[in-house]
Image: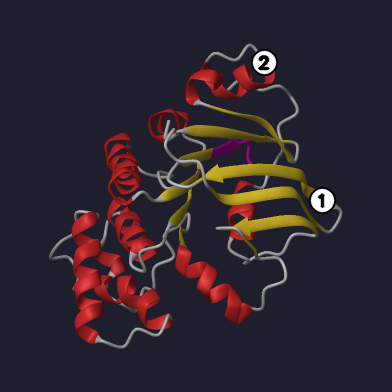
Amino acid sequence: MMSDKTSTFIEVRDLQIAFGQQKIHRGINLKVQAGETMVVIGGSGEGKSVLLKELIGLLRPDQGSVKIDGEEIGGLKERAMASIRKKVGILFQNGALFDSLNVSQNVAFPLIQSGVSDQNRIDERVTHCLEVVELSNQGEKMPVQLSGGMRKRVALARAIVNQPQCVLYDEPTAGLDPIVSDSINKLIRRLQKRNKVTSIVVTHDMKSAFHIADRIAYLYQGRIYFEGTPEELKNSDDQQIKNFIEGVSDNHHCLE
């Protein structure tokens, strides 16, 4: 645990959202401390990815509050949200790379969008971020030439190119083999330790969750059912939690 970190970077209060008649979040309350890695787990359809989109204003909740670095984002216009998004990078589940741009151009895209025009600065940042994700000298490749793991690494380089204080990861190891998954997990940990990056990681992969988490939040039936350390989760006697960790059906599983 990062006991020396006491400031709250993300605070969510009574977050509620519904799509039509389907209630996704029924009152989520969560605090993420600066510099820690919070892993969010839960069944399919529980709204884990929805939560990430609410944290950066891509989706607006029906009710509740989201604060990023002490600033309430609920009433912010799109221009004001741009400054928030400089603080928070996101790694989308499928990488979401632009197929028409090469690796370097994909990584540079957020810098250009944020108004950076100095090509030397752009090249320097892109080179550094590709080194961080262990993809040096791959800048000229097109996304179609990359493996799934490499695409995730490029997407991660793009997520950190603006030097955000926080990175949101949506299923960073989905579809990857165990060895590549382990390398992604180590990258997430390295970013946290070296750069003091605050991280929220959505995953179904319990091995990854236990490997990278400082704390784990279990989302169930629209609320945070459990929040605590990996050890506390492992040692829980709660049957619902044990069933989820062990992959045992309880006949109440939410479908996609």
- What type is the residue that disc 1 sits on? Gln
Q: Residues within 10 Å of mark 1 (few under 14, many from 20)?
A: few
From this view, report whether residue 187 is shown above or below residue 211: below
Q: Nearer the viewer, residue 242 or 56?
A: 56
Name the mark nearer the viewer: 1 or 2: 2
Q: Is residue 71 magenta?
A: no
Residue at the image point whose x is 62% and y is 67% from the top: 58
**Amino acid type, label 2:** Asp
Quarter residue 59 falls in: bottom right
Quarter in which the C terminus is drawn: top right
SS at mark 1? strand
Outermost residue toward the bottom?
Answer: 117
Secondary structure type for disc 2: loop
The label number, if any, that marks residue 11 in the structure image: none
Residue 141 in view: no
- Which range is magenta? 40-45
Q: Residue at x 32, y 78 (%)?
A: 101
Residue 255 appears left or right of 48: right
Measured from the top left, where is residue 26 in percent x and y? Answer: 80, 44
In the picture, the quarter occupied by the N terminus is: top left
The image shows residue 134 at horizontal and vertical percentages of 19, 54
User: Outermost residue, right direction?
Assistant: 21
Res 22 label:
1
Residue holding disc 2: 238
Number of numbered labels in the structure image = 2
Q: How is the image coloured?
A: secondary structure
Whole-percent x, y for residue 72 in the image:
67, 63
- Label 1 and label 2: CA atoms lie apart by 27 Å
> Would you call the spot at circle 2 few (<14 residues within 10 Å), some (14-19), or many (20 or more)?
few
Please, is residue 233 above or below residue 217 in the view? above
In percent of width and height, residue 97 lies at: 39, 68
In this rendering, position of residue 43 left or right of residue 99: right
